[in-house]
Amino acid sequence: MGELLVSRPDVGEFRRRYKWMALGAFLAFCAVCVRLFQLQVVSGADYAAIAHENIVKRVSVATTRGVIRDSFGKILASSRPAYNVYVIPGRAMPSARPKRRNDVESEPDSFGKIVETLRLNPDERTQLEAKMRAACEYDDDHSPCWRPVLVREDLPRDIVAEVKQHQAELAGADIVGSPVRYYPYKNLGAHLLGYVAEIDADTLAKFRPAEDPLPGAPELSAEDRQKLNPLGYEPGDSLGATGVERSWESQLRGQRGWEKRIVDARGRYRTGPEADRLLDGPQSGGSPRRQDPIAGRDLRLTIDIELEQAIEKIMRAHAAGAVVVTEARTGRLLSLYSKPDFDPNDLSGGAGKARVREQFGKMYEDPLRPMLDKTMSGAFQPGSTFKAFSALAALENKIVDPDDHERCDGYVIFGRRIFHCTHVHGRVNMHEAIAQSCNSYFFKLAMQPGMLDDISRIAGQFGLGEKTGLGVNPETAGRIPNRAWYALRYKGQFRIGFTLNTAIGEGDTLVTPLQLALAYAAIGNGGQLWMPELVRAVETSDGSVVQEFPPRMRHQVEVNPANLARVQDGLYGVVNDGGTHAGTAYAVRDPSLEISGKTGTAQTGYVAKEGTSAKMAWYNAQNHAWFASYYPAKNPEISVVVMVEHGGAGPKVAAPLAVEVIREYARLQAVRAGKPEPKNSKPIPENPKPGNHP
């Protein structure tokens, strides 16, 4: 018993350790309390704001792209509402989720009803079901099972109404509205207007640097990101791909808005009084729920869409070509027509990505190159339309007396080559050589020393061989070769034959229809070369003018007015000289229209490649048909250039088309001025005589 009352030495040791344990527990408790005080009291407001941000999602509100109108206010491009349907796999098909949650069995599938409502065919149903089951392989809150899947784009309105009417039965299906670019005139003006396309990853990367920069790389500030991406591009956005849509993207795009939405852990939107309380609560800091988008600016073009419609009918019989109509004293473009063309509605994504891929596939396989804007991106030999500049070069350098006559026997022998004329013209002076398009006259003129460089210099003054600066589509400069160019290409072996070909617009000489239209406008207006203008003004949606663009002259061509008048007289004779030595376009002359111009028939020098079909080879071997003109002959208002690609002879093919274009222009001007239509006015035939087709 006594032994039990004796204190054990290990008990004292335990008591000493217990005190330290108690002290440690007390200190830990104090630390927890301090931390709780810091979290709940000191930083409570900050953490409440963070928690609030976790349930509040800022959703972008799409802006409206600016409207494009013609010079008379007709809408050429606008935006229409489109509705896409998205499905959340985990809600539409609970049976596809792993059986790890108690609610899986109680949630019915709405997949069958969704398929029925959206009118999906068996193949589409099978593909969608497989995609949804694959997405729900995992069932955590951030898995693809809870991310919306795009099912169908641009739904018909009856299906949209049905989905919204049966929303309660279509769990997981959601209709999302988005604006889609719409072109009411379809193919008309497709090249000049262009189209919009979804931004690709490479382009987006230029505007939006990686969210997670490389180790050691400086993180961009919000200000720097704004500078890199001033228009606020996000994945899935559309931007102008070609034409006016691309070159005026910064004005047309607008600025998107945003609105705040309450979301749950699975990303589902919540509405109702509780959601309103959270949005308006003290954690919101009084910030607004929504910022409205800012619509893009509208553009008013110089184009006359009614004239463009008439040109489309006039060119209906021909497979490919270009027509340019420009105001002679301002450079404003009334028409830029390129054929073949395309429907920008098919490429702007409204009908779905599959339709876009299908249309691009067809166009890239088309040998007539429908994506090429032949008014400015295509360069062609101008043929005899170029003789006006050769004649002016000879006059400026006093190489020829315009009243002297040269004999045309139908050909010229130079060295071991024979250079052919169209036929035997007899004795002709400069006026007759231009009017009757005598090659022999210009061959002999080109034999004079230094003529190649003289022709190149004069053509360059009229803007040939250099880009016009319109900046709408990729523009080719063409080519006006000089002696130095040939010396480089042929390693110093220059031949006079090069000059003979250049003098009649053949060989290595290349121009665009736009260049030639501006050059002929300069011939007609006394030497004023204007900058081409396509956009007249930037406007707000209510029609107020934000910025207007007046005409700009590039320069005054430095030529003797008397020499220019000589060339003008020859161009007048092309259309108006009759008799036994009639001008090449006299047969299509309209007595009520005083037109000056020049026909051209340009050889292509095409050599068929192996594998080319016989039909396509025959088509490509045909000449290009040209007619370059201005109207009226005195004090011209417009310049018109028609080029029918592989169309044949200029006098027979291009000249009558150009006269039709000028006739339609005169009719429209009379109607708009409230005057009666000209007596010579006649409707454009709906089924014109077919031209060359491959």
Image (cartoon, helix red, strand yellow):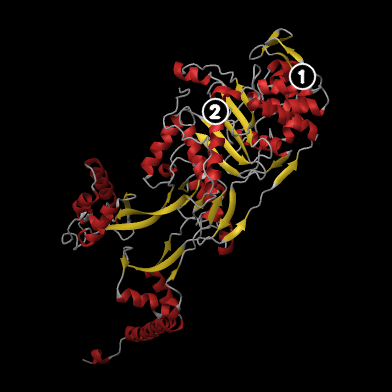
The front one of 189 and 198 is: 189
Q: Position of residue 524 (x, y in %)?
A: 69, 36
Q: Which amino acid does label 2 sit on?
A: Pro
Q: Outermost residue, right direction?
A: 398
Residue placed under numbered mark 1 in the picture: 445
The front one of 561 and 302 is: 561
Q: Where is residue 246 in the image (x, y as percent from the top left)?
A: 54, 47
Between label 2 and label 1, give the one nearer the viewer. 2
Within 10 Å of the Cα at label 2, are there few (<14), some (14-19), or many (20+) other Cα atoms? Answer: many
First in sequence: mark 2 vs mark 1: 1
Name which quarter of the figure residue 659 lies in.
top right
Q: Where is residue 530 in the image (x, y as percent from the top left)?
A: 68, 43
Q: Outermost residue, top direction?
A: 416
Residue 554: numbered disc: none
* Residue at position x 69%, y 19% in the image: 501
Residue at disc 1, secondary structure: helix
Note whether 386 is above or below 197 in the view shown. Answer: above
Q: Position of residue 224 (x, y in %)?
A: 59, 60
Residue at disc 2, secondary structure: helix
Residue placed under numbered mark 2 in the picture: 656
CA distance for labels 2 and 1: 30 Å
Horizontally, residue 65 falls left or right of residue 433, namely left
Horizontally, residue 27 falls left or right of residue 271, namely right
Q: Split into 4 quadrants, where in the image is the N terminus?
A: bottom left
